[in-house]
Amino acid sequence: RMTMESGKRVYNAFSIAPKPITVIVEGNIGSGKTTFLKHFQKLPDFAVVDEPISKWRDCQGHNLLELMYKDPQKWSLCFQSYVQLTMLDLHVKPVLKPVKMMERSIFSAKYCFVKNLKDQGLMNDAEYTVLTEWFDFIQETIPLQVDLIVYLKTDPQVVFERIAARGRTEENSITLPYLQSIHKLHEDWLIHKKFGPVPRVVTVDANEDLSKMMTSYSMCEETIIQKVA
Ligand code: DGT
């Protein structure tokens, strides 16, 4: 028998595990979500589910991320429908630890990325409507539990420099105005709550050099643990 003890809860791998607290980590491209999650991956009570970007770069041999950046008008619907599927897959993935952490969500895909493509005229109204109908259907039929959102807030200029420095090939066409739009949509969604009610948001100033962010990580750890206790 395999059991995992965590605070007051006892987990038995052969019984149905209690529902974990789900935390999603959001923020602009290059805001440090992966580094943030790496910190939590080391802690015993946290299950970090894999980020789907590797799937976007290799969908049975197709690099959908690259296609989307090269010709957004042609490939955005295809890319975003795959993002929606891979995100849904992560949302429903069961974990055996008290806290489940995810990098991004089906929500940022919809409210930030899809909305931006639509606003920029890169996705037409018919395509946007089909994606939205799928999104609404998923929300109505599948429980997508989110208890807490960690928002890594950055200045677009800062992430612009980080993205240039990391040199991911698909991303060499990313411009400052693009990052400004994505930033604004994160603010509209998480701070101004323009797209409806959102779960509790913890905002972290993520402009600091990534290596200096340990203090913020520990603060978030406290907040999350308090919520779990
Ligand atoms: P990090 O760790 O904060 O630096 O995060 P990134 O930049 O590795 O990960 P993410 O999810 O912000 O972006 C991955 C790439 O996918 C990036 O080039 C933006 C692009 N992308 C376009 N549309 C979407 C979408 O709907 N969702 C997500 N997650 N990414 C999208």
Image (cartoon, helix red, strand yellow):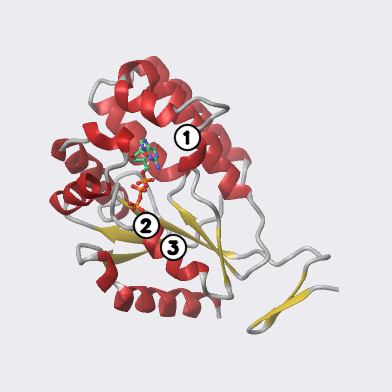
Kind of residue at badge 1: Trp
Q: Which is nearer the eye, 59 or 21?
A: 59
Indicate the position of residue 186 as horizontal and vertical percent values. Answer: 28, 48
Residue 36 lies in what quarter of the image? bottom left
CB contact under 8 Å: marks 2 and 3: yes
Q: Quadrant of the C terminus?
A: bottom right
- Assess mark 1: CB under 8 A from ligand 1? yes
The location of residue 212, given as percent across then percent down, is 25, 73
The residue under label 3 is 37
Type of amino acid at the residue the image marks with label 3: Leu
Residue that numbered label 1 is attached to: 56
**Residue at screen point 51% across, 72% down:** 42
Decide: few, some or many residues near mark 1? Use Cα within 10 Å; few <14, some 14-19, many ≥20.
many
Residue placed at 46% from the left, 22% from the top?
Answer: 78
Q: Identify the residue position indicated by label 2 in the image.
A: 33
Quarter of the picture containing the N terminus is: bottom right
